[in-house]
C-alpha cells in the first residue's frame, strides 16, 4: 500500500457508519478539539489494489436496500387440522445474501408470502405478510416477530398439530418463521443446542421412563403416548415420574 493510500484509509475512518464498529467489535475514540469547518465524503480510491475492499463496506440489512432481481428462499407447507383450514398454507420466505463471498456474509429474510386455496382470511393474511416483510427489510433483530405471532390466541381455542398445542393459526405461522430463522442462523435451535447438562438430563429421564414402562412412543410426537401438555413449552411431553411431572422436551419438572 502506498503512503498516499494509507492516508486515505485513515481519513476514511471518520466516515464509517457506527454499525461497522459494532460488527467489527472495535472501539475507537477520536477527540476533535477544533471547530468542524467542513467535511467531505471519501470516494473509492481508483488506484486501490483490486480485491482489497475497505472494511467499512460491510453491508447490514436496512430499508434502503434495493431488492435484487433474484432472491433465494424456502417454501414451507403448513397443514393444519381440517377444522382450522381445509387447505394447506404455503409460506414462502425469501432471503437476501449480504457481503457475499466475504467473512461478513450473512443471510437475512427479505420478504414473506403466504398462499392457500383457502381465501377466507385472505385480506388479513396479505396485511400480515406485508407488515412482516416491512419489518424484515428494516433490519436489526427481527426475531421478536416469532414471539409476537406465538402470543396470538384464537378465542375459539387452539388445536393440536404434530403433538404440539397451537394457540392459533397465527402462532403456528410464528413456528414456521422460527424454523426459517434457525435455518439461516439467526436463531439458536432450542432442540439441538441446549446447554449440555439440560440435554443430558432430558435424555437420562427419557431412558429411565421408557425402561420402567411398557408404554409405546407416539409416532407423531416422539414422546410417550400418555404424556400431558407441558405448561412451560406446550409440547405434549410431560410424564409422571416419582410423583413429579417431568417434561421430556424442555426438562421442566413440577413435584407434588
Ligand atoms: Zn416442557
Image: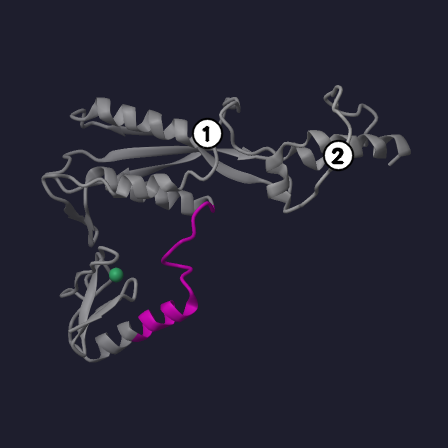
**Mark 1 and mark 2: Cα distance apart in space:** 29 Å
Q: Nearer the viewer, residue 224 or 135?
A: 135
- Disc on the earlier residue, 1 or 2: 2
State the mark number for residue 51.
Answer: 2
Position of residue 105 measured from the top left corner of the image (x, y, whole percent): 58, 40
Mark 2, secondary structure of its residue: loop
Q: Residue at x 88, y 30 (%)?
A: 4
Can residue 29 be seen at all in this image of the molecule? yes
Can residue 112 be seen at all in this image of the molecule? no
Q: Which callout, 1 or 2, points to the residue nearer the camera?
A: 1
Magenta span covers which residues?
Answer: 185-204
Q: If the picture is divided into quarters, which one holds ligand 1?
A: bottom left
Residue 137 is one of the magenta-drawn residues: no
- Is 121 left, or right, of 60 in this rendering? left
- Is 207 left, or right, of 27 in this rendering? left
Position of residue 64 measured from the top left corner of the image (x, y, whole percent): 52, 22
Amino acid at each position: 500500500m502506498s503512503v498516499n493510500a494509507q492516508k486515505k484509509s485513515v481519513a476514511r475512518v471518520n466516515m464509517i457508519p457506527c454499525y461497522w464498529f459494532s460488527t467489527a467489535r472495535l472501539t475507537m475514540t477520536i477527540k476533535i478539539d477544533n471547530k468542524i469547518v467542513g467535511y467531505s465524503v471519501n470516494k473509492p480510491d481508483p488506484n486501490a489494489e483490486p480485491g482489497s475492499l475497505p472494511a467499512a463496506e460491510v453491508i447490514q440489512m436496512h430499508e434502503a436496500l434495493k431488492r435484487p432481481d433474484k432472491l433465494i428462499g424456502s417454501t414451507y407447507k403448513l397443514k393444519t387440522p381440517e377444522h382450522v383450514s381445509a387447505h394447506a398454507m404455503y409460506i414462502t420466505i425469501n432471503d437476501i445474501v449480504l457481503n457475499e463471498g466475504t467473512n461478513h456474509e450473512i443471510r437475512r429474510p427479505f420478504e414473506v408470502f403466504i398462499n392457500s386455496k383457502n381465501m377466507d382470511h385472505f385480506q388479513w393474511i396479505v396485511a400480515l405478510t406485508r407488515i412482516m416483510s416491512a419489518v424484515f427489510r428494516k433490519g436489526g433483530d427481527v426475531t421478536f416477530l416469532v414471539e409476537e405471532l406465538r402470543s396470538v390466541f384464537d378465542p375459539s381455542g387452539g388445536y393440536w398439530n404434530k403433538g404440539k398445542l397451537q394457540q392459533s393459526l397465527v402462532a403456528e405461522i410464528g413456528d414456521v418463521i422460527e424454523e426459517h430463522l434457525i435455518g439461516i442462523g439467526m436463531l439458536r435451535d432450542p432442540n439441538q443446542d441446549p446447554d449440555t447438562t439440560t440435554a443430558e438430563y432430558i435424555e437420562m429421564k427419557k431412558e429411565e421412563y421408557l425402561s420402567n414402562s411398557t408404554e409405546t412412543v407416539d409416532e407423531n410426537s416422539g414422546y410417550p403416548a400418555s404424556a400431558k401438555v407441558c405448561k412451560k413449552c406446550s409440547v405434549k411431553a410431560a410424564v409422571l415420574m416419582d410423583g413429579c411431572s417431568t417434561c421430556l422436551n424442555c426438562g421442566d419438572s413440577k413435584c407434588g
